[in-house]
Image: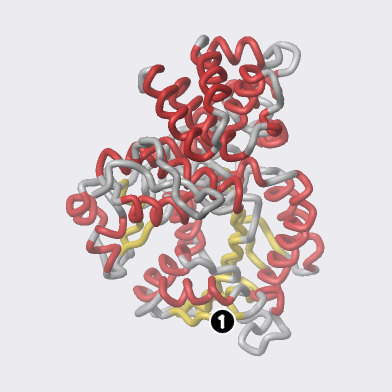
Amino acid sequence: MRDTAPRGGTDRRGARPARPTVDRPRYAAYQAVAAVNRDDAYANLVLPSILREEGLFGRDAAFATELTYGTLRHSGTLDAILTSAAGRDVQRIDPPVRDALRIGAYQLLHTRVPAHAAVSSTVDLVRMVGQGATGFANAVLREVAACDLDTWVSRLAPSMETDPIGHLALAHSHPQWIVRAFSEALDGDLGETTRLLIEDNERPPVHLCARPGLADPVELADASGGAPGAFSPYAVYLGGGAPGDVAAVADGRAHVQDEGSQLVANALAVAPIDGPDGRWLDLCAGPGGKAGLLGALAAQRDARVTAVEVAEHRARLVEGATRGLPVTVLHTDGRLVGAEPKLPEGHFDRVLVDAPCTGLGSLRRRPESRWRRQPSDLPALTRLQRELLTAGLRAVRPGGVVAYVTCSPHTVETHVTVTEAARRSGASVDFVDARPLLPAGMPGLGDGPTVQLWPHRHGTDAMFLAVLRRS
């Protein structure tokens, strides 16, 4: 097993230069952060392969993971601090050096790594990835280390009294437009908005879903070293380790799924309807978590699920996620209800529209998303959401129900989309109070009829749920 990171690039003659000693966890984190920023990669996809390539396990893998996700979550605040410490805009720093400095600054401001170790290890990393910049890196990091995080925030952030959104954005490393959207969804409560932002920056636990009829959640919790979930009857909070190492996950009796996603899918399954109950539809099924849960529930009730996915590779994921369950996967566009023979109008008893969205409700799990999403993404997404929900309302029969779900609390993607789609559909629909469809005694569900889940209230992703019955 290697003790240091791989060599750097080659010189003009093709010979590899001598490399500095860089510990493998920090080098693995650098590779992941660089891939995210350089290639628009996703940390959850690239980091596991990097850890395997570097031969990292246990504490070393955990440290590399902490550095990767922590740096990505806090990069907005780190960039502001690095800009001040460097005396130049961070965007003018060579990208490899910039990524190394972000990792170093994260260690200085957010971990217990001694300052001398954080500085020296980052300088070694810069020596490998950004030749000639070691003196600059050393000076910048020593400037960063001169103050703690609170002091930097008080120095750089706008006043909370005069610009609360700007202050919260810098203090808690979220773009201002996202902070504003969260605040609006929380009725302008800045205290609660602050708690949400803090929770967004915490490392979330892994949630498992014990598929009903196939796995018992208490037994799964015991076998995985976890604990039963607080709200979903199928949820298990994984205590540690890789989910793929859990036997029930490996053999398809359980899958990884946020507890909030379990709750909204189950809400569709328990909503009261009139008449038959054998034909269910998941109109936007990829990658298949909700289709897997619905399929397991359908199997207990002699029902079948039609799972629709427009992207071919995601349709294959749905097929893998639902293997052995009463689920038929259609590789087609869900908006083709009425035009696609296998998606007739007025045919389905229960319809799930888990619409593509900004994903602002899962920023704690996808830290790079907060920096990639822009307000300009909303018009195209909300148009698609309305079209899909309108198709779902065409697909459901009178007396049946449609659940509209997004992993975003942005009011344009939630209340505005639902209201507009219901108005434009031409169908006669009524809102069903979604609160009784969630576990009794669940706190913080609001006034209804829709429900917004929150990381800081419920420990789930910020899932939105509206249930409509066609009359």
Q: Amino acid at mark 1?
A: Leu
Please identify the residue farthest to the front as the structure is shown: 13
Judged left or right of residue 81, residue 317 is left
Please identify the residue farthest to the bottom as the structure is shown: 341
Q: Give the quadrant of residue 173.
A: top right
Residue that numbered label 1 is attached to: 330
Vertical arrangement, residue 39 with respect to residue 327, above or below: above
**Percent coordinates x, y for residue 17 in the rendering:** 45, 44
Vertical arrangement, residue 286 with respect to residue 325, above or below: above
Judged left or right of residue 158, residue 70 is left
Residue 257 visible in the current orientation: yes
Q: Give the quadrant of residue 193.
A: top right
**Percent coordinates x, y for residue 196 in the rendering:** 54, 31
Task: Give me the residue at 61% from left, 23% from top.
Answer: 82
Front position in the image: 158 or 126: 126
Determine whether the residue tagged by mark 1 lies in a helix, strand or loop. Answer: strand
Front position in the image: 275 or 414: 414
**Percent coordinates x, y for residue 379 in the rendering:** 79, 53
Dot 1: few (<14), some (14–19), or many (≥20) neighbours within 10 Å?
Answer: many
Vertical arrangement, residue 323 with respect to residue 11, above or below: below
Vertical arrangement, residue 234 with respect to residue 65, above or below: below
